[in-house]
Amino acid sequence: MLSEQALLYGNQSSAIRTLFEYGRKRAAVVGKDKICDFSLGNPSVPPPQALFDAFEAVLKADPMDTHGYTSAVGCDELRAALAESMTRRFGMALKPENFFITAGAAAALTACFCALTPDRETEFIALAPYFPEYKVYSETLGAKLRIVPADEVNFQIDFDALERTISKNTRGVVINSPNNPSGVVYTRATLEKLAELLRRKSAEAGHPIFLISDEPYRELTYGGAEVTFVPSVYENTLVCYSWSKCLSMPGDRLGYVLVPEQVTEWKSVFAAVAGASRMIGHVCAPSIVQKAVAKCVDAMPDLTVYARNRNLLLEALPAMGYECAKPDGAFYLFFRSPRGSGNDFSEEAKARDLLLVPAVTFGCPNHLRIAYCVDTAVVERSLPIFKELMEKK
């Protein structure tokens, strides 16, 4: 016998991956330069030179150290570098002991969901639009994921809907800012209001309701947008981070869980995260990657192309009549389908080799996502197709 849940997940690829694989096969037929593929959030800029230099230095070091196990919680160098960097940048005193190093943000999120799931009555809350894998990570553990509908005007938080969704079984609320798929950044005022609500609801429930802050796009912002350091607003915050986007290294799989000391019973929470990671097969994150990133935790690639692509789309699409959320971060543009159904519009675009992810699995069935982490030439080629699709209306 097989696990029905595992079989289901194995046979049902995500909408993003399904479209990406279609694009790869289609490109082999018509040529890559004929496809406008906005499906996958795969960085299109190379990592910064500092990362290449760091890998070179690590490869020249003692091979038994470079390729051996690190501690399960992560190598000393990386945890120390993180504590120093984030204390300096965010003004909160952090120690190496506050960081658990993981194989990317997916592993960090799964560990947090697992650590905060005491029984099968456990509920987590995601705010639409949300990354659809949250459902996989939480429900695999026997928890329930409840969805708060999107504020489709400003893409901040519908607090009335959130308050109605919180119950005595709620253990955590997942936030993602800058957001995938909208690119929107939650304002500090939004986060302060959220903190007030969670403190009140925690008191009513008799246990902490945690904020799980999913932050792989924290450094990718435009126009001076401020990304608030969430633990500075709400004490019971667990931060899940990945270097996939900020260092353009998604395939190298490195991230962390931050458990600040202000978290209620933080040592027990940290131990539960560590134990949860052990339960899901974690030994240690890739040693060579940990040691390289430890040498360049503050490095950033050249993000000029993302800003250029964003500006092109934001100038062109609204002028054609598309309703777009303004992305102040990440590398996504979220827009309302002019036909009503995001799935239907995606199919129309696909017939013209324009690949746009329908947002039904993000919790917004009438929207679509553009991942503009592509060459600018792809954006320029896409604009006449967008215009044709709108004029067909």
Image: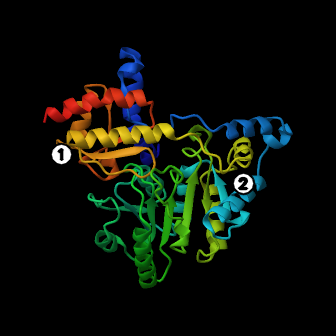
| Residue 211 pos. (x, y %) | 49, 68
Circle 2 packing at 10 Å, graded few (<14), some (14-19), many (20+), is: many
Q: Report the amino acid beneath label 2.
A: Gly
Query: Which quadrant would residue 39 be assigned to in this image?
Result: top left
Nearer to us of marks 2 and 1 is 1
Residue name at image x 52 percent, y 67 percent: 230
Residue 340: mark in rendering: 1
Q: Report the amino acid beneath label 1.
A: Gly
Secondary structure of the residue carrying tag 2 is loop
**Residue located farthest toward the left when viewing the structure as drawn:** 393
Residue name at image x 61 percent, y 37 percent: 47
| Residue 76 pos. (x, y %) | 77, 56
Secondary structure of the residue carrying tag 1 is loop
Tell me: residue 66, above or below residue 159: above
Is 294 on the left-hand or right-hand side of 30?
A: right
Query: Which quadrant would residue 204 be assigned to in this image?
Result: bottom left
Query: Which quadrant would residue 51 be assigned to in this image?
Result: top right
Disc 2 to disc 1: CB gap under 8 Å: no
Q: Is residue 361 visible?
A: yes
Tell me: residue 146, above or below residue 10: below
Q: Is residue 12 visible?
A: no
Front in this rendered view, residue 277 or 304: 304
Residue 74: mark in rendering: 2
| Residue 177 pos. (x, y %) | 45, 57
Placement of the C terminus among the 4 image quadrants:
top left
Tell me: residue 33, above or below residue 87: above
Residue name at image x 53 percent, y 50 percent: 106
Mark 2 and mark 1 lie on one chain; the one further toward the N terminus is 2
Circle 1 packing at 10 Å, graded few (<14), some (14-19), many (20+), is: few
